[in-house]
Image (tube, rainbow, N blue to C red):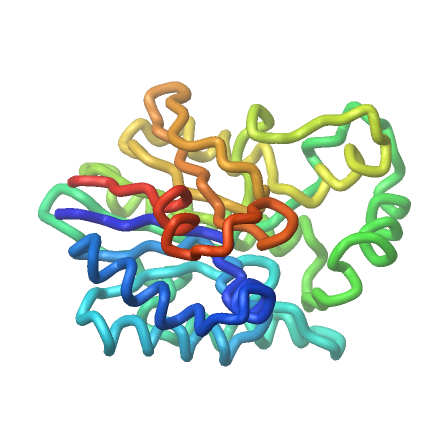
Amino acid sequence: MKICIFSDLHIDFNGKKLGITFEEEFITFVKKKEADCILIAGDISNTVQVTLNFIDLVQNATGIPVYFIPGNHEVWADGEGESTVAIEELAKHPSCLIHHSIELTKEVVIVGDSGWYDYSFIEEMNLLEEDIKGFKDTNWDGRYTHLKLTDKEYLKECLIRIEEKLKQYESKQVILMNHFIPHEDFLIWKSDRFWNLCNAYMGSKKIGECIKRYKNVTHCIFGHTHKRFGCVEKDGCMYICTPLGYYGIEFFEQDLQVILEESCVILEV
């Protein structure tokens, strides 16, 4: 079985910047790959409806099942608690992995959840939690994400769901997909303190610790960082991170077929 893996497509941003219909380009690409299954690890677009329309369009046009989990961009919203409402709406879609898993074969299962962050990656900076939250609200997407829970509470909720699924499929090979960085080795540190503080919102050590407890997790797919790390093995698990990113920032090639080729990972199971 051939799986095409993507993350951080940002179809609304990239389609507008490139002056193309992203959906058409994407459909052309995956048809050429003759994939049996498509996995997208979040940040398809900035809204619930654009994301769901994209999933439906790709599936209907190709006949290829698409499975996804939300990133932080899908749940951008205005009102208090509205990001939680967005997550719940996305989770209702049969292609979303938050509330169910996919048995690809008798031996292989895809488990997924959005994941989130808990500031654990910057513990050594010894900052007050209220200052980290305040920085997020003024300089990160705290202006756009409005959960009913705190960041730490929502991550805990995600990890409970993930662990329940991992226990359920302990006898099978698991491909785990979440949006956020699961291991500190995938962080980017600079001499810029402002940049380094943003690592608070990149993911959580607890995601990686959870993976480490379950030796049957053979692959972990994630995105969020717009740096393409490729496929990196750690402690018996293959971590896959090849986000598309933003045109004009992470890539400058105008031919989307070329960039999709560079950012797509093919996994054979």
Res 103 seen here: no
**Coordinates of residue 112 in the picture (x, y in percent):** 39, 52
Residue 131 in which image quadrant: top right
| Residue at (46, 34) in percent of width and height | 210
| Residue at (26, 42) in percent of width and height | 266
| Residue at (45, 41) in percent of width and height | 242
Residue 211 in which image quadrant: top left
**Coordinates of residue 20 in the picture (x, y in percent):** 48, 71
Residue 21 in which image quadrant: bottom left
- Which residue is farthest left? 106
Please state which of residues 92 and 7 is positioned toward the viewer in this rendering: 7
| Residue at (82, 24) in percent of width and height | 191
- Which residue is farthest top? 235
Quadrant into which the C terminus falls: top left
Is 60 on the left or on the right of 121, as rendered?
A: left
Task: Please say if 247 is above or below 263.
Answer: below
**Coordinates of residue 26 in the picture (x, y in percent):** 35, 63
